[in-house]
Image: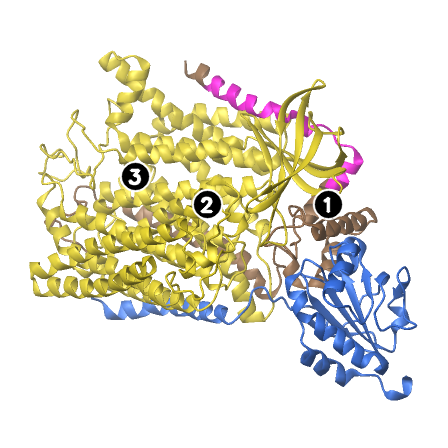
Amino acid sequence: MRAAFALLVVAVLALAVTPFASAAQSTPSDTVLEARVRAVASELRCPVCQGESIQDSPSALAQEMRTIVREQLAAGKSPDDVKRYFTDKYGEWILLRPRAVGWNVLVYVLPVIALLVGAAVVMRATRRWAAQPQGAPAVPGDPEKAQTG
Amino acid sequence: MTRALGASAVLVAFGVALLGMVLAVAGARLQRYQLIRGAYAAVYVNFGLLLVASLAMVWALVTHDFSVSYVAQVGSRATPLFYTVISLWGALEGSILFWGLVLSGFSALAVWGGTHLDPRKRAETHADVERLMPYATAILLGIGAFFYLLLVFPANPFLPVSPVPPDGPGPNPLLQNHILMGVHPPLLYLGYVGMSVPFAFSMGALLAGASGGSWIQLTRRWTMAAWAFLTAAIIAGMWWSYEVLGWGGFWAWDPVENASFLPWLTATAFLHSVMVEERRGMLRVWNLSLITATFALTILGTFLTRSGILSSVHAFAEGEIGYWFLTFIALVLIFSLALVAGRSDQLRTEGRLDAVASRETVFLFNNLLFTVFTFTVLLGTLFPLVAEAVRGVKVSVGEPFFNSMTLPLSMALLFLMGVGPALPWRVASRGIVRREFAVPGIVAVLIGLVIAVVAGGGIYAIAAFTFGAFALTINVRQFVVGARARMRAHGENPPVALARLIGANRRRYGGYVAHLGVITAAIAIAASSAYKAESESTLRKGETMSLRGRTIRLDELWGRQEPQRFVVGATVSVMRDGAAIAQMDPRLNFYTTSEQPITTPAVRSRPTGDLYLNLMAVERDGSTATIRMIVEPLVPWIWAGGMIIVLGALITMLPGRERERERVVAQAPVPGVPSRVPGLVPASPLIMSEPDARGAGS
Amino acid sequence: MNWRRAAIATGFAIPLVALFSYGMTRDPREIPSPLPGRAAPDFALEVFRAGDDARDGPSPGDTIKFADLRGKVVVVNFWASWCLACRDEHEALSRVARAYADRGVQFLGVLYSDRPASGMAWISDMGGQSYPSVRDPGSRTAIEFGLYGVPETFIIGTDGRVSYKHIGPVTEQLLIEKIEPILPPVASQ
């Protein structure tokens, strides 16, 4: 019974996905280039839009910038070269992800530190709380149980 | 006349709010009930005043009374009635007026609820609430006073205009293009402002020197309702972006989008950890902090939208108002941080868990993840400002950053959404763990493999499907097991068993329904971006373009003059096997007040996904049109998932008539005290507690 | 009420509020350009409208090359007929261009994301333009200059380096202020 149910779930989800089966078909070489263009273009900010990448933006300037990206990648430049080309003209602002140098590193590192520290705190607290003797936990609002600070 | 009425109503409301604050605090300190009653009256009076002011404004808008400054700013005779009415919240001043209305309404509801508690509530609860109500009222009035003051000075929508212009420019074209604009802002305000009430109760409790925790149950339902509104608002906002902005996306991590998401994250964390407090009496200070953070984040969100310190699609006109919000947010932060830090000792209780492997622990990790999520998004949103302050350089923090930093957290949360419901409260034995997770684990791995092999799509798509399948299996199983137990015990047939199951345990199963909604939306979001396909072509009439097995043909190009805009459209046929099976009409709308046209993409939704057409450009002589064609899988399931989440929230809020078993407020066994206290049957619309039993057995 | 702890907690609010106050003094739409001080990008653009004053200047169809302008101060103004703010600066540009034309300053209008026909119609409406305007197909030159929008004006010195970039409409006073210090010596006329 349980197995049948499980298989049903698998079937439903697999059905949801089969329309995309064609997406995974092997791609001709220019689509490989397109994928690279898309990857780089997603990292560059459209200068005349509000926060969109040049990949997403339908504006003419973004289109032209995508063409530049395509030309440069096709000519053998690396994604970093392409990004440097644009930062030379527009400054660091054009990158949607801050370069991890200097103070910028904080924006990447602080969340990770927060996660690690938080996890450590939670694990320590959980162990400490589970080690308490059973039998006298506080009942919400019960004045009889003295609230220990 | 209308103008004077609105202006004076707002001015009086400000005065009444101040007076009410004084009465509330004085009454509480001096123990004079008459004064406190006066404060409550002030709250009701203010609701009436704001209602008058708002109705006056709507009347002025609808009658095109351009002698009122706000109407002169956003009104236009050419604008259709629906958009005229909703332009109430279309620009800064009107939006503040709307905020004031919602705030005054919720304050009135909160005061009424707090002064009309169910008499069957425990005596301590009554005492606690009675002590905190005056202070909570003072805080609500204080927040109100700030907004009414804004309406009198920097954001006054009722200023006179002279000479009276014959017509106005109409609302921002982006706000006139889709009916969802009538839905998203009100829901957002209901959610945002709704969070003021739990905040007021919490701060009120601290000010009143409450030592019990019962008042938190008073706020749980408010928080749940506000959360439901906020969820609906965020989904509606995503849907609106998708249908209007034309890039086929729905979330760009724009600062103002983040501003609405941040309080949602902390509120979701709260909704989980409050369950630990209700059962174990612990985490009180933490929950208090979450409520405070949620409120502070709503004010921060408003500040970010209106101050102009961050560039955003959403930014309202800037000006003076940023300084007012800055002052307010400083006051809110100082006040609440001082109060929580200074008075939290009286609430703190010793934490106790029966075992590390238990649902409580899962909730702790859930809170950890939500907190880190909130911190990451907040840091990323504010970082451009920090970088400029420290390095003097302008940097951008956009989608690539937020996606890479938060997707792992989302996957972990998706996983926990499966673990939590499977583990029992208090302690999970090895046997339980093995039994609960074996099948879902296998299912998940299978799905992951199927997806990876059949569709690919990158690690996050595969992870979303894997963890999603895991959580889906477990959550669905809760319903199946519970219903089956009922069928065995009561002989009911499946639909009845299911309905009764949910009815008898609304909080639990409403929560599971909400989980199902989140899982659906999460999988759909992952699929829609991983498996998206996009292509752009310039077509002549009669020409076709194809993408992923779908073909469209450009049939006609047309133009049409409407009162407020000129519309250029393409009639496109969706082809199958050479025959046209459907028609779509992507459009470009040219408003007189805007340089660039606003796009109206055409979207054809099917359960498997959307076909999305955007008209990029049309040749002047109408010979060709450039169309961007996007195939976006599973997108309708995002909106469906959102609705399921809200449905789950609604289920949890249904008032109780749970005759079947006695309620228990705390589960922990206390020596000498029976674990069930008969006769406690909460039926208050504000306070609920939750039986621990799963289905019919435990 | 533990005042000490309250005070410490309040302290945490201070950096946030300070950050927001600082933010209020900044304009997020003003992006500093890395170009000033650097060599201006090379360009060769086709004229679509000759300047009203140019007796022997370039005519429509000619190509203006940046290399040919070496030794002059070049003022490059990006504009469009759909740009509202461009109207504010049009007078000032034409007037200053006329005043400094024989002092070694070449003004150039570059049309951005627009059709030459619309551009010409706009100029007629605005009462003419004393200097030539060129087209920038595909906005390639705009990207080379790191354009964020229109209007933007670049002042390039005689050494070919960008001396100043202005975002938004310029005024006569500002133009003169920026051009005067870098004028070529009279002998090179």
In this image, B120 relative to C14: left or right? Answer: left
Q: Are there few (<14), some (14-19), or many (20+) residues within 10 Å of tag 1?
A: many
Q: Which chain is brown?
A: A
Helix, strand or loop status at disc 1: helix
Instruction: Look at the image and give the residue range highlighted in magenta.
Output: A6-34
Q: Is residue C145 visible?
A: no
Question: Residue B576 in magenta?
Answer: no
Q: Which chain is blue?
A: C
Vertical placement of residue A37 versus B337, above or below: above
Residue B355 numbered tag: 3
Q: Amino acid at mark 1?
A: Val
Residue A37 numbered tag: 1
Residue B143: percent from left, percent from top: 29, 60
Given residues B167 and C2, the one toward you in this image is: B167
Select label 1 or label 2 by which is in front.
Answer: 2
In this image, B542 relative to B445: left or right? Answer: right
Q: Are there few (<14), some (14-19), or many (20+) residues within 10 Å of tag 2?
A: many
Q: Chain of mark 2?
A: B
Select label 2 or label 3 by which is in front.
Answer: 2
- Chain B tint as drawn: yellow
Residue B400: percent from left, percent from top: 60, 49
Q: Amino acid at mark 3?
A: Ala
Q: Which residue is mark 2?
A: B83
Residue positioned 71% across, 56% down in the render:
A83
Residue positioned 28% across, 14% down in the render:
B487
First in sequence, mark 2 or 3: give its number.
2
Given residues A111 and A71, the one toward you in this image is: A71
CA separation in Å, label 1 and label 2: 40 Å
Residue B690: percent from left, percent from top: 23, 35
Given residues B371 and C123, the one toward you in this image is: C123
For the residues labelled 2 and 3, say whether their Cβ atoms are less than 8 Å apart. no
